[in-house]
Amino acid sequence: MKHHQPLAFALFGIICCFSACQQKPVTEEKAGKEKVCISDSLARIIQIDSAFTSNINDEVKLSGEVSFNDNKVVKVFPFSSGQILKVFVSLGDKVKQGQTLAVIKSAEVAGNYSDLSVANNDIAIAKKQMENASALFNNGIASEREYLEAKENYNKAISAADKIRTQININGKGQTSANGTYIIRAPISGYVVEKNAEQGSFIRNDNAQNLFTVGDINEVWIWANVYETDVAKVKEGYTAKVTTLAYPDRVFMGKVDKQNEILDPQTKVMKVRIAIKNDSLQLKPEMFANILVENKELRKIITIPSKAIVTDNGKNYVIVYHDRCSLELRQAEILKTVDGNTYISKGIAAGEKLICSNQILLYRALLEE
């Protein structure tokens, strides 16, 4: 038994040494590891930019529809009943102010002119009677009362004729004629966007429907839908960028000029109106529109170019440049990204220099440093 004791002590020593070796840390710092530096060739292909402070730009994406500017749309109604003799325009036609849209034959208009002719005759008769009464009164043959009655009848005849003439001017706006026809003209320049007039059809006295609607689309409105979660992000005066399916590469600039204060009870959306100049006439009413509303807040925050960010395993990093052999890999907390700029809530200070292009060439080396 004694002969085996030295062997047992030797085995015990080996086990203890092995256990001690297992407890040593496996991540030891390598002695003499080289620093990561930017070589001359690498310096030519990287770009260095600085972090800065700016106002937060917020964007809200909305959907909407192109509509007419209601202040530049006019509905054209018939002046009186009658039959449409001729229609000169079709739906969608471009018209100029004063252009003839239709001609209508009206018994009412003919009757007005007939009444005016009778009234003019009454004026002539009443005037003759007044002049005779005046002569008789001046010669002492007729009484003053007879003269005053004749003068009153003359004034009444003039008033009756003026009333008919005014009625003709109001109903026809000077576009009527004694044969009973009257002309419907375009009240403004624009496009015929509604047409309810057909040649040969009749217009009744109780007809309340307009014959035409003429709209000017040099300026249009976009009615956008704002959901309840975004109501606080959209206000009057904010800039809006509008795109359409017809022109996906064209951006139309406008401003929010009206905000409804009531949400639709069914859709739970608030309507906002965006006014846009449409000199090219590319925007057509009823077009679907995508709207990007920009909100520039007054709050300042650290901002960096978005291309400076390196994303790895769900984390965001930047490479801070101190000098060619002093580079720092730093994690950044992103608030949001808008138009090529990224707003940083934590991790970067204003004025710090960042590598903004080809930084991935340095990222792995710095990660292992």
Image (cartoon, grey):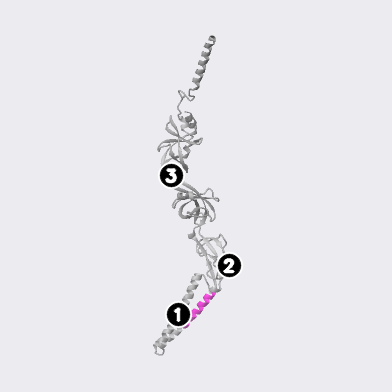
Nearest to the eye among marks 2 and 3: give it: 3
- The answer to whether 7 is drawn above or below residue 241 in the figure is above
- The answer to whether 189 is drawn above or below residue 82 in the figure is above
Q: How many marks?
A: 3
Mark 1 = which residue?
156
Q: Amino acid at mark 3?
A: Ile
Query: Magenta part mainly helix, strand or loop?
Result: helix
Of callouts 3 and 1, the N-terminal one: 3
The image shows residue 85 at horizontal and vertical percentages of 58, 69
Question: Do tag 2 and tag 1 residues touch (Cβ < 8 Å)?
Answer: no
The residue under the point 47% across, 73% down is 166
- Nearest the eye: 83 or 124: 83
Q: Specify start and end residues of the magenta stretch as a single range.
A: 110-125
Residue 146 numbered mark, or none: none
Q: Is residue 212 visible?
A: yes
Is 111 situated left or right of 158 in this image? right
Residue occupying the far front of the picture: 1
Residue 56 numbered mark, or none: 3
The image shows residue 303 at horizontal and vertical percentages of 43, 40
Nearest to the eye among marks 2 and 1: give it: 1
Mark 2 = which residue?
86
Residue occupying the far top of the picture: 3
Secondary structure at numbered mark 1: helix
Secondary structure at numbered mark 2: strand
Give neighbour class at mark 1: few <14, some 14-19, many 20+ (Cα, 10 Å). some
